[in-house]
Amino acid sequence: VKNCYNIADIDVDGWNIGGVVGQNNSSGSIENSYNIGSISKKISTGGIVGLNDGIIKNCYTIEDIVEVVGKNNGTLENSSLLNEKQMKLEENIILEGGEEVNFLYILNNGTNVWKEDITGINNGFPVLD
């Protein structure tokens, strides 16, 4: 799964519940994606994926919801919780080396797939180009 986002609220019974994917198997990968929808806290619940056995790279979820991954047995790279202002490009993100960048820069990850929501169609959160 690449370049995907979820804005829907999720409230289901069970486990392995994610904003983008419920379970990511060992051969799977999820990249350059984000979640802003709320998720009811169940067993193995994550903003991006509930249970990860594969690769999660460059994925973000809004803070105060849940963690990026509910249960991680795989690889988690360059993925974290961000606040609403960061995700709406109103506040920069400070990288480990001290460099300040906006959310589009890290979400695009060297591509131009994501753009600013200048029309308000996604309540100010990035949209696919």
Image (cartoon, grey):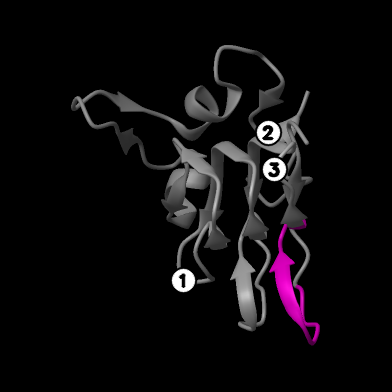
Let me know if residue 72 is in the magenta part. no
Residue 103 is situated, as x and y percent measured from the top left of the image, at: 49, 34
Residue 118 is situated, as x and y percent measured from the top left of the image, at: 68, 33
Give the residue type at disc 3. Ser
Give the residue type at disc 1. Asp
Mark yes or no: residue 20 visible.
no
Residue in the picture at 64% in, 42% down: 54
Looking at the image, is 86 positioned above or below residue 8? above
Residues rendered magenta in the picture? 10-22
Mark 2 or 3, which is nearer the eye?
A: 3
Q: Secondary structure at mark 1?
A: loop
Q: In the displayed structure, does residue 49 sit left or right of residue 89?
A: right
Q: Which residue is mark 1?
A: 64
Q: CA distance from mark 2 to mark 3?
A: 37 Å
Q: In the rendering, which numbered label is found on residue 26?
A: 3
Q: Which residue is mark 2?
A: 118
Q: Secondary structure at mark 2?
A: loop
